[in-house]
Amino acid sequence: MKKLFWVFLVIISCSISYGENFLLTTYIVNEPGSPLAIVVPQNISSNYFVKVSFDTNLIFKFYHVFGQSVSIIPTPVLYGKSNLNIYVYKDNKEVFSTNVVLEYVGKKRKVFKLNLTETSKNILKDSKRIEEDRKYLLHTITSSTPVYFYPSELKPFILPSTNNITSPFGLLRKYSNGKINYHKGVDFSFTPDDNVYAANDGIVLVSSNFVANGKSVYIYHGLGIITSYFHLDEVYVKEGDYVKRGLVIGKIGETGIVTGRHLHFGVYIYGSNGYVAVDPISSIKFFNEIISGKSVVKKGENLGKRYE
Ligand SMILES: [Zn+2]
């Protein structure tokens, strides 16, 4: 895998606070798509929620973790410099806002051409079915994600495959129809172990066959975290199943639009009206820090001071 020299800078430029003591926790890595978290060092009510400037339709809830309230939020995958405004609401009234500057510095982004199989090139032409699938998926996930679900025990996330990663998150790829899109997950090779493991305990939201993503599984893990597994050959779980971390949920295959047999693994942050893909590798490290306890507040930068 070619090493990419991206630098991910997070600069906190201003903050305003109107009540609770808010902390912004950042996970700084050299890849785009790393999540952030807003942390309140006490349990706050479900009246609080977070919005982000790149899609104000999304609503990110707070979850209680070890006496703190944590809202994990995604960052947009944009190349160059961008501003991310983060707003905290209570009962639909804005009570806190902060601004984060995201900047990817480094080599000019290269666009990788995908060498799709002939079958995949034909599937890609069926844009109507691909769009229907996208709408069905959005509807299924936003209407069935049980945000009240909280795992009985917070366990660290694991990767769904022990095989090598063949394609990282965020790569710009050109399809045979000329469209350029960034890679919304990581790909694993299919050897030596073709098992696909659930990344954590959770509820199966979707287990279906899609034209572009092939046989796919989506699992909700609580805390607003969803994982997805695409292009499977066989699937052993159905919608509504409660799965334990490490359970074999399927076999690596080449269903859907592919360049060959592999597992595509995605991680999404759920925002009530939708969900945003984040870098699975850096996200899992970040989630595991949150799940392991106290490190979040220690690492967080205090942005807000209480005043009356
Ligand atoms: Zn992929």
Image (cartoon, rainbow, N blue to C red):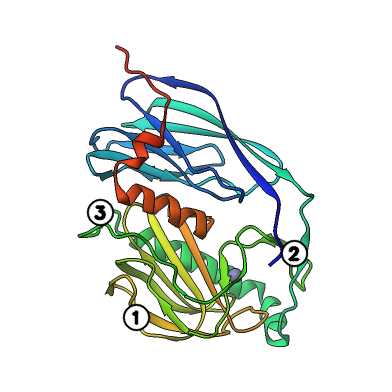
Q: Nearer the viewer, residue 270 or 290?
A: 290
- Point 52% across, 85% down: residue: 192
Q: Is mark 2 within 8 Å of ligand 1?
A: no
Left or right for 171, reference 133: right
Residue reaching furthest top?
308
Q: Secondary structure at mark 1?
A: loop
Say which quarter of the image contains residue 191.
bottom right
Q: Residue at x 56, y 47 (%)?
A: 29
Q: CA distance from mark 1 to mark 2?
A: 33 Å
N-terminal of the pair, mark 1 or mark 3, is 3
The residue that label 2 is drawn on is 179
The residue type indicated by label 3 comes to: Tyr
| Vertical relation: 19 (above or below) 289 | above
Q: Residue at the location (73% across, 86% down)?
A: 118
Q: Which residue is mark 3?
A: 148
The 10 Å Cα crowd at callout 1, few under 14, some 14 to 19, many 20 or more, is some
Q: Which mark is residue 228?
A: none
- In this image, 209 relative to 92: left or right? right
- For label 3, the crowd category at 10 Å Cα-Cα, with few meaning under 14, some 14 to 19 and many 20 or more, is few
